[in-house]
Image (spheres, rainbow, N blue to C red):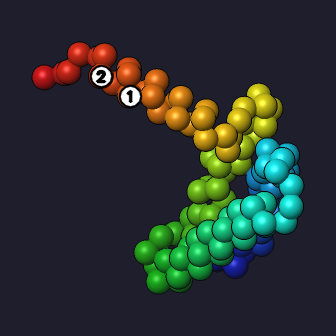
């Protein structure tokens, strides 16, 4: 049953990597092989670990077979959507100043909001 679901999940995983890799390559404009390659390898290792855990959990009966096969895709879809959104709005994903500004704004909102008792 797991293998049957995996036959459908792997082509979808290929499309998912397309939707993760294309914006990643467009966002990381610094060029070179170093940073984009490192991020790509990290994403693949995460995917491989999720596939391994999903198969193990499905074969041991911890999760249903369909969930074990589709778990890597379900985990990586939010990242793909986030990267696609970042690229569509041309947001500075890896700009440190943008992240500092976001954290400062969030911290200011949290301090300004009344404490719920």
The quadrant of the rendering that contains the N terminus is: bottom right
For label 2, the SS is: helix
The quadrant of the rendering that contains the C terminus is: top left
In the displayed structure, does residue 107 sit left or right of residue 100? left
In the displayed structure, does residue 47 sit left or right of residue 107? right
In the displayed structure, does residue 95 sit left or right of residue 7? left
Quarter-of-image position of residue 90: top right
Q: Decide: is 107 above or below 1.
A: above
Judging depth in this view, the residue of 44 and 61 nearest the camera is 44
Is label 1 in contact with label 2 (beta carbons under 8 Å)? yes
Numbered marks: total = 2
Q: Visible in this render: residue 11?
A: no
For label 1, the SS is: helix
Query: Residue at 76% of width from left, 40% of height from top?
Result: 84
Mark 2 Cα-neighbour bin, 10 Å: few <14, some 14–19, many ≥20? few
x, y percent for residue 108: 38, 22
Query: Residue at 38% of width from left, 28% of height from top?
Result: 107
Q: Decide: is 91 above or below 64.
A: above
x, y percent for residue 83: 72, 43
Query: Residue at 78% of width from left, 37% of height from top?
Result: 87
Q: Decide: is 73 above or below 91.
A: below
Judging depth in this view, the residue of 1 and 101 nearest the camera is 101
Q: Which residue is mark 1?
A: 107
Query: Residue at 45% of width from left, 28% of height from top?
Result: 104
x, y percent for residue 62: 43, 75
In the displayed structure, does residue 40 sit left or right of residue 22? left
x, y percent for residue 116: 19, 21
Query: Any mark on residue 111, and which?
Result: 2
Mark 1 Cα-neighbour bin, 10 Å: few <14, some 14–19, many ≥20? few
Q: Visible in this render: residue 95?
A: yes
Quarter-of-image position of residue 96: top right
Query: Any mark on residue 88, and which?
Result: none
């Amino acid at each position: 049953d797991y293998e049957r679901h995996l036959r459908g999940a792997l082509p979808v995983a290929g499309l998912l990597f397309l939707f993760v890799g294309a914006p990643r390559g467009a966002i990381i404009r610094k060029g070179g092989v170093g940073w984009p390659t490192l991020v790509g390898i990290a994403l693949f290792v995460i995917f491989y670990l999720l596939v391994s855990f999903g198969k193990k959990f499905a074969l041991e009966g911890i999760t249903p077979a369909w969930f074990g096969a589709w778990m890597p895709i379900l985990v990586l879809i939010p990242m793909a959507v986030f990267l696609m959104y970042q690229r569509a709005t041309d947001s500075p994903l890896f700009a440190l100043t943008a992240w500092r500004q976001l954290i400062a704004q969030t911290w200011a909102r949290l301090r300004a909001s009344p404490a719920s008792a």
